[in-house]
Image (cartoon, rainbow, N blue to C red):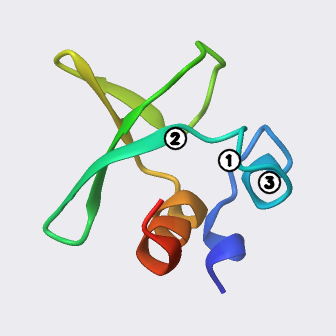
Amino acid sequence: MVLVKTRQCKKNFGCLKDDQVFCKADSFVNNEILFVKCLNNHDCSYKMKFGFSNVCHCPTRIEIYKIYKK
């Protein structure tokens, strides 16, 4: 299960409770790299700067994108 892979979540899986918690998906490359636009500067163990963008490595967030395209 994907939640087991998300071991570093400091937000207690807030993205599963409130869609305002997670960053907005910008693009998904090669079915594995999720670029996101974050509306806040909250610290996240899975968010990483990549140039002027952010990449999300959260297994749960990536699965949400794959299923709901958001």
State the residue at coordinates (58%, 35%): 45
Name the amino acid type tagged 1.
Gln
Q: How far apart are marks 3 and 2 (CA)?
A: 12 Å
Of pointers 3 and 1, the one earlier in the residue sequence: 1
Q: Position of residue 28 (x, y in %)?
A: 24, 58
Query: Looking at the picture, which amino acid does disc 2 mark?
Result: Tyr
Q: Residue 8 has which mark?
A: 1
The local crowd at label 2, few if under 14, some if 14 to 19, many if 20 or more residues have their Cα within 10 Å, is some
Q: Residue under circle 2?
A: 46
Q: How many marks?
A: 3
- Depth check, mark 3 against mark 1: the one in front is 3
**Are the residues flagged by discs 1 and 2 in contact, CB closer than 8 Å?**
yes
Find residue 55 and report its image quarter. Answer: top left
Task: Identify residue for label 3.
Answer: 13
Q: Is mark 3 on a helix, strand or loop?
A: loop
Snapshot quadrant of residue 56: top left
Q: Residue at x 42, y 68 (%)?
A: 69
Asked if residue 63 lies left or right of residue 4, the reply is left
Query: Mark 2 falls on what kind of element?
Result: loop
